[in-house]
Image (cartoon, rainbow, N blue to C red):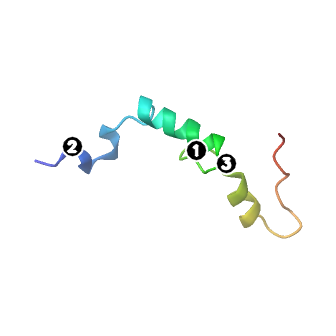
């Protein structure tokens, strides 16, 4: 029998602990799984065609 941790689907991604971590990570400018990463988009954009800077 596989352990409960063998499948990521057994852990809901909108669990209160994930929501709180995502809130803390967002507040400190960190990357949050499942959300766009503006820095990564800027880094992988071809020269001359860089994504616009995020507002805010």
Figure label count: 3
Which tag, 2 or 1, sits closer to the chain's start?
A: 2
Residue 3 against residue 47 in the figure, above or below: above
Mark 1 surroundings: few (<14), some (14-19) or many (≥20) residues within 10 A: some
Q: CA distance from mark 2 to mark 1?
A: 26 Å
Say left or right for 38 vs 34.
right
Residue corresponding to mark 2: 4
Residue corresponding to mark 3: 29
Say left or right for 16 vs 55.
left
* Foreground pick, 27 / 38: 27
* Residue beneath the point at 57% across and 40% down: 24
Q: Are marks 2 and 3 in contact (CB under 8 Å)?
A: no
* Foreground pick, 50 / 29: 29
In the displayed orientation, state which residue is furthest to the bottom: 47
Q: Position of residue 33 (x, y in %)?
A: 53, 47
Q: Position of residue 56 (x, y in %)?
A: 83, 39
Tag in front: 2 or 1: 1
* Residue beneath the point at 28% across and 47% down: 7
Q: Position of residue 49 (x, y in %)?
A: 86, 62
Residue 5 against residue 47 in the figure, above or below: above
Q: CA distance from mark 2 to mark 3?
A: 32 Å
Q: What is the secondary structure assignment of the residue under circle 2?
A: helix
């Amino acid at each position: 029998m596989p352990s409960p941790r063998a499948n990521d689907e057994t852990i809901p991604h909108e669990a209160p602990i994930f929501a709180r971590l995502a809130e803390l990570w967002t507040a400190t400018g960190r990357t949050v799984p499942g959300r766009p990463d503006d820095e990564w988009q800027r880094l992988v954009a071809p020269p001359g065609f860089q994504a616009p800077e995020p507002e805010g």
